[in-house]
Amino acid sequence: MTASPSTLTMFRWMVRRDLILAWRRRADVLSTVFFFVIVVSLFPLSIGPETQLLRSIAPGVVWVAALLASMLSLGRLFANDYQDGTLEQMLLTPQPLYLIVLAKVLASWLVAGVPLALIAPVLGVQFGLSQDTLLILTVSLMLGTPVLSLIGSIGAALTLGLRGGGVLIAILVLPLYIPVLVFGAGAVDASIIGVSPQANLSLLGAVLAIALVFSPWATSAALRISLE
Amino acid sequence: MLQAENLECVRGDRRLFSNLNFVLRPGEFLQLTGPNGSGKTSLLRMICGLLAPSRGEIRWEGANIHSLREEYSTVISYLGHRTAIKDELSGLENLRVSSALDGTEIRDTAARDILRTMGLGGRELLPVRLLSEGQKRRVALARLAVCNTRLWLLDEVLSSLDLTAVALVLSLIEDHLGNGGMAVVSTHQEINLSAGSFQRLELAS
């Protein structure tokens, strides 16, 4: 796989195209963020002002909410391109499908993952988290949400064109999210009890590196099967 | 040179065609006709490599297209029923994105010129969803003016086009054939080309 100028052009344009499309359909993006905000906020509202309890459940709650919110946008990742024939064209271009998938996942992370990481510290205040912990929360989400997008893209590609694909994606993908959940929530937990979160963050980074290499490849294979 | 040998297509439990052979040389045009459901789209998808034939093989310059893979992709341009046009993007954005996907970056001004020759002058910046069906198809066809592939595979591209647009597309095809290109086009319309040599393949129902 060589990065020729035409490949770079393609990569830039694919990311740009998906960002323009996301901007023109911003309701979709906003609904993901809004879902995340609401789900996270329901917990302090229902449990009441018990700081100790809130503080101990915060990592799990925020991370589970991030997992569910990122599921919401998965169905759309390839569905529109599949319906209007763009996906066929992507398979027929001389460009490596691996990079096309990577460009699409990057764009989807920028609009669905990054906003979650950026808004999480604001929500964390409701749980009485300290400033250091809020920082770790953001860092862990910044490392973890790209993994969610990458792994999710495999599920989205596998369920392409199936009826009831939404539920199927959840069943396929949520078990694969578990390592991210464990290390992500673990890092925040460690920071709350005053231990260094570095081990968990490193593991999260390792998961990201593995996902970055393998999942676009798996997604490409799944897309080829779906379009057969 | 494109060769199809002994092709057979089975969709579900129906055999659409079998024992299909043809050869397409540079400068040649192949029109696919036949009733609905006779396998025109399936045949075109086979020639693209999107669908594997149940029997037989398709060869490009003597090599099976499935063994050529990405090398073969640089040779073909496929335009199907589903035109790969995004409703939310403007004609200009659609054209620039689709040619970037083909690996050629075209400048804003060049893209505008092409859209103008396709009869979309003044509508370059409108979201495509505001255009008529025929105009959308013109946006999709504008891609042919940019690409420099040798084999064009066009599926029912002339439907919903008016007479001037049909003439425009035919002149694009004539230029393409004149430069040694090849085209396989499925359409029910009568086609009269002034350049290239013409073949017709009729698929039976």
Image: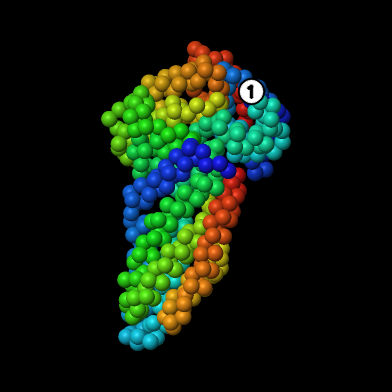
Q: In this view, does A115 lie above or below B148?
A: below
From the image, which quarter does the C terminus of chain A lie in?
top right
Q: How many marks?
A: 1
From the image, which quarter does the N terminus of chain A lie in?
top right
**Residue B175 placement (x, y as % from top left):** 48, 18
Query: For residue A172, what is the image quadrant?
Result: bottom right
Protein image colouring: rainbow
Q: Which residue is drawn at 52% across and 17% down?
A: B179
Q: Residue at x 39, y 76 (%)?
A: A133
Disc 1, SS: loop
Query: For residue A155, what is the image quadrant?
Result: bottom right
Residue, disc 1: B1
Read off the chain for label 1.
B
**Residue B5 placement (x, y as % from top left):** 70, 28
Left or right of residue A55: residue B40: right
Q: Is residue A98 above or below residue B21?
A: below
Q: How crowded is mark 1: few (under 14 residues within 10 Å), some or many (20 or more)?
A: some
Left or right of residue B185: residue B93: left
Q: Residue at x 51, y 68 (%)?
A: A202
Q: Residue at x 33, y 36 (%)?
A: B131
Q: Residue furthest left?
A: B122
Left or right of residue A69: residue B76: right
**Residue B165 placement (x, y as % from top left):** 39, 23
Q: Nearer the viewer, residue A8 or B125?
A: A8
Q: Is residue B185 visible?
A: yes
Q: Which of A27 and A134 is in front in this view?
A: A134
Task: Please name the amino acid that badge 1 sits on.
Answer: Met
Q: Is residue B42 above or below residue A48?
A: above
Q: Can residue A78 be seen in this view?
A: no
**Residue A185 placement (x, y as % from top left):** 47, 74
Q: Which residue lies furthest to the top in this view?
A: B194
